[in-house]
Structures are given as C-alpha cells and as structure tokens.
Image: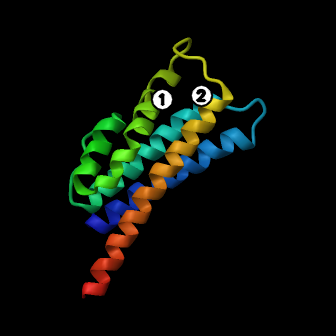
C-alpha cells in the first residue's frame, strides 16, 4: 500500500469513528455515552496516525494519544495545544469496555466528541495544506 493510500485509509477509519460517536449522542435514547467516548478516542487515534503516516512515520501500536500527539508535535508545533485533549481521551480506549470502570455523564461524552473532532480537523487540515504545498512546488 502506498503512503498516500495508507493516509487515506487512516482518515477513512477516523471519519467513520467520529461519525459513529456523534450519532451515538444524537440518534439514541438513552444516549450511548460510553460507546460515544470509545469511538471519539478511536477517531482521534486514527487521525493522529494518519498525520504521522503522511510524514512517513510508522505510528506505534498504541492507544496512548499523548504519545501520538507528541510525535505529531515533532512534525508540527501546533499539535501541542491538543496534549490536554489527548490526555482526556486516552482512557476511553480501554476503560469504557469494562463494566463498573467509569460512569460517564453526557457532558463528558460531548467533550470527548468535540475534542476528537478538533483533533481530526487539525490532522486533516494540516495534511491537506502539506499536499497543496507539494503540488504547488511541482
């Protein structure tokens, strides 16, 4: 798979997870808060991995969004602003999959989905800008 294809595949998966997270908050009653948080975390993780892949950096097999964000920050300082959001989202990769690990309220799930959307948008925007820059140089 080419680097461009891999980046696209990561973004496709990130897009689906973000869409699912939003729908779990909008289209279900009762709202599926734990599942929304899980998919929000997954979307952010895959978007960060897409950004790293664009830079020809093989993303580690980890759910630690802080680690991934720091790696992205090595390529683009603007990712520093997402360290807090990554710290907030990281636990949702695991704790929501087990009973009695955490009780989530709607405001927490909404924050998780918003943070994931912000991270996704930054990754996608930066990759798009870099691609345009390369095309202009050719």
Of residue 21 and residue 113, the one placed in the foreground of this image is: 113
Q: Secondary structure at mark 2?
A: helix
* Residue at point 21%, 60% (across, down): 56
Eyeballing the image, is 25 above or below 136? above
Q: Residue at x 33, y 74 (%)?
A: 131
Residue 67 is left or right of residue 11, and the answer is left
Q: Position of residue 3 (x, y in %)?
A: 26, 65
Residue under the image location 40 percent in, 48 percent down: 46
Q: Which residue is mark 2?
A: 34
Task: State the scheme by which the image is colored.
Answer: rainbow
Label disc, if present, on residue 117 of the rendered structure:
none
**x, y percent for residue 116:** 50, 45
Among the two numbered marks 1 and 2 on one chain, the one whose residue lies closer to the N terminus: 2
Query: Taking 112 as reference, is 34 above or below it?
Result: above
Question: Few, some or many C-alpha atoms within 10 Å of disc 2 (few <14, some 14-19, many ≥20)?
Answer: many
Mark 1: few/some/many CA within 10 Å (<14, 14-19, 20+): many
Task: Indicate whether 138 appears above or below 59.
Answer: below
Quadrant where the image shows the N terminus: bottom left
Residue 29, horizontal then vertical, whole percent: 78, 33
Q: Quadrant of residue 54?
A: bottom left
Res 92 label: 1
């Amino acid at each position: 798979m080419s680097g461009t294809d891999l980046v696209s595949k990561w973004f496709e998966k990130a897009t689906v997870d973000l869409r699912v997270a939003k729908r779990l908050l909008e289209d279900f009653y009762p709202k599926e808060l734990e599942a929304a948080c899980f998919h929000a975390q997954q979307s952010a993780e895959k978007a960060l991995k897409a950004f790293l892949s664009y830079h020809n950096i093989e993303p580690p097999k980890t759910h630690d969004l802080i680690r991934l964000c720091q790696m992205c920050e090595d390529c683009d300082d603007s990712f520093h602003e997402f360290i807090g959001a990554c710290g907030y989202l990281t636990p949702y990769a695991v704790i929501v999959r087990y009973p009695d690990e955490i009780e989530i309220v709607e405001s927490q799930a909404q924050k998780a989905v918003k943070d994931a959307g912000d991270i996704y948008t930054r990754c996608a925007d930066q990759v798009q800008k870099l691609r345009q820059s390369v095309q202009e140089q050719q």
